Image (cartoon, rainbow, N blue to C red):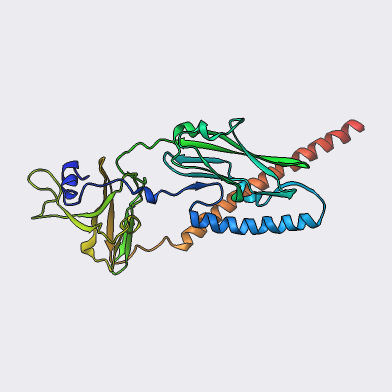
Amino acid sequence: MGVPRCILLLLLVQVPQAQSRPATEDTDTDAVKSSEDEDDESSSEENKLSNELSTSNEKLQPLAPQWVMPEKMEKQLHAVPASRTVKFRCQATGNPVPSLRWYKNGKEFKKDQRIGGFKIRDHMWTLIMESVVPSDKGNYTCVVENEYGSLKHTYLLDVVERSPHRPILQAGLPANQTAVVGNDVEFVCRVFSDPQPHIQWLKHITVNGSREGPDGHPYVLVLKTASLNTTDKEMEVLTLKNVTLDDAGEYTCLAGNSIGVSYHSAWLSVVNELPPSPLPSQTYLEIFIYCLGFIIILIITASAVIYRFYCTTKKSDFNSQ
């Protein structure tokens, strides 16, 4: 039996109202790297390579533009939630050093065309747009050129508006399990939620021989609940050590946020020992029967072909006489 909504909400009453995740937890979307530290580290590596190529080019002949790290530009479509920061990079080298221009949907991209504008880091060949909104959707093309040639590359940006909803639990989790007495068991529950979720693990119990109270609500025991020091990932796993026959029963993963509550349940069966696997001889017998049938079919087919060939040859000899 499932857990009625009213008792689930009662279980969550001791927890403060869930709040949205801090904005600082949002990660940037970058065509190469996301965080500022990684961005600087990656760019320093690429700038070093670019400088080496430029120095080498100065000693050699003039060179048309070429990408420094084209493998980091392979991902073209970027779908991100609204309010994220997006970075597109088109680092190139050449001799002389090429210029860089940005276009949106085929037209030159100017700061006054976007609320909040955008940033261009020339030394990192990067376009940065903070707090993107649906109107930022489109094709962003970088063009690098010098007097010996030009290159261009297009990124596709899709901005998805956030719609708050109650937690979504991955289908099939937690899964029913069978364990031997003395073994450890892990139940896994994957929770997807935009507002910060609160996760609890419950076990259905019996009181005076009944699984339900006078009001029809099931009796449950809270096995695990979130604290200040636990993470969502830790709460998504329930571990039962050295299980006994008393641990058998129904377990529920309950997740709630400021929008609502969701839950999935699974059963644990505990046995003294696992049933023996099917006898190998039976498996071998089935394989032998299949092989024998296949051989018989081959023999019949071959016999029919030989007989037909023999009859055709004999008829040809008779006609020739």
Vertical position of residue 114 compared to residue 4: above or below = above
Q: Residue furthest right?
A: 321
Estimate the x, y position of residue 293 in percent, counting from the top left. Answer: 58, 49
Estimate the x, y position of residue 259 in percent, counting from the top left. Answer: 26, 40
Estimate the x, y position of residue 287 in percent, counting from the top left. Answer: 54, 55
Task: Tell me the residue at 28%/57% (across/down).
Answer: 268
Q: Is residue 262 left or right of residue 190?
A: left
- Name the residue nearer the viewer: 228 or 106: 106
Number of marks present in the image shown: 0
- Name the residue nearer the viewer: 211 or 32: 32
Q: Is residue 211 left or right of residue 146?
A: left
Task: Tell me the residue at 63%/56% (across/down).
Answer: 47
Vertical position of residue 320 compared to residue 233: above or below = above
- Name the residue nearer the viewer: 124 or 274: 124
Estimate the x, y position of residue 112 in percent, counting from the top left. Answer: 51, 32
Q: Quadrant of the N terminus?
A: top left
**Quadrant of the rendered image containing residue 60:** bottom right
Vertical position of residue 107 compared to residue 206: above or below = above
Q: Quadrant of the C terminus?
A: top right
- Name the residue nearer the viewer: 257 or 170: 257
Q: Is residue 172 left or right of residue 86?
A: left
